[in-house]
Amino acid sequence: MKMNKKHAKGLIILICMMLLSDISPLAGLKNLETLVLYDNKISDFSALNTLTNLQRLDLRINQISQLGAVNGLEKLLVLQLDDNQIRDVSPLKELKSIEWLSLDSNPIGDISPLSELKTLEILHLYDTQISNISSLKTLTNLTSLSLLSNNISDISALAELKNLDSLTLASNQITDISVLKGLTKLERLDVRNNKIDDISALMGLKSLKELDISQNQITDASVLAGLTSLETLEMDDNQIHDISALKNLKNLKKLDLSHNQIDDISALKGLTNLENLILRGNQIRDISALKGLTNLERLDISYNDIDDISPLSSLTKLQTLKLRKNPISNSDIEKLRLYVKCWG
């Protein structure tokens, strides 16, 4: 590997999926600012600690277990270390300028050393075997935080993170989300696959555009009535019967209500911006409320009790329609085929 060191200022080097293990030839590129070494066989990156001008370093999908080599990389703004074998993150506390840190899929467990990274704005800790996130309360500049697929039950530390606009807490052991009520800048929230039955804390989060509360134990959706900025709402696999609160959510483009206990969908008739609607696995008989949803492109009403599909004849933008396991007659199917030919 030959490098022209004289002309390496501002250079972006990408060496991906090359089975590379020895990166010592890079050591002399003192002016290098961006280095991407994604998906190689690197276990030792100590050769890089002389690259003091590095601002972005991508070492995802390698064989790294030790992080001592970050010493000297004080200008790093972005560091991506996903899918390695890292357990000890204490060397990272020296990164005083870091803004984006990604450690997904590492067996870390203890993230307390990260409490000193006060400049962090984006932090990804998916599948890192963590249960205690109390050390995150000092990271008040965070705007995006992902804690997907861990063993977290207590999220009280998040109360201090008032600048968050994106928060992912999916697939944990969370029951209480009351702490979220103060995070009024949130635009995207994902708490799917937890043990949540009370979502009243979401009532004041008026900036939310994307909300995923699926795979929980929710029965009452009334608190969502005021979240009129929502464009995507996923609440499948709960125990919801009454969806009348959704009638005010006029900006919705995607709505997933599958696998609940819904039999009345009249509240949906005014949601004319809907493009993707999933209602499978409920107890719905009457779909007349859908006839005015003329922007629908994808509709799934499988596994219900629907026998009349004539309201669908006006949905001329439909690209995908799923109807299986409903008591629909063959004649109705033939009529729908005729409508589809007319649309074309």
Image (spheres, helix red, strand yellow):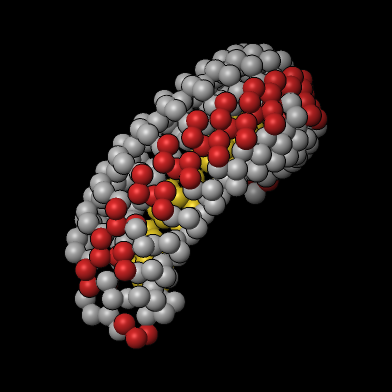
Question: Which residue shows up at 61% across the image and 38% down it?
Answer: 161
Question: Which residue shows up at 22% across the image and 54% down it?
Answer: 43
The front one of 163 and 279 is: 163
Residue 286 visible, this orientation: no
Residue 82 % position (x, y)? 36, 47
Residue 271 % position (x, y)? 76, 34
Question: In what quadrant of the picture does the N terminus appear?
Answer: bottom left
Q: Is residue 50 left or right of residue 293?
A: left
260 w.r.t. 292: above or below:
above
283 w.r.t. 279: above or below:
above
Residue 234 % position (x, y)? 60, 30
Q: Give the quadrant of residue 261.
A: top right
Q: In this view, does 272 lie to the left or right of 73?
A: right
The front one of 279 and 85 is: 85
Q: Is residue 267 left or right of residue 324?
A: right
Residue 192 % position (x, y)? 53, 27
The front one of 233 and 173 is: 173
Question: Which residue shows up at 31% across the image and 36% down it?
Answer: 107
Question: Which residue shows up at 35% across the image and 75% down it?
Answer: 30
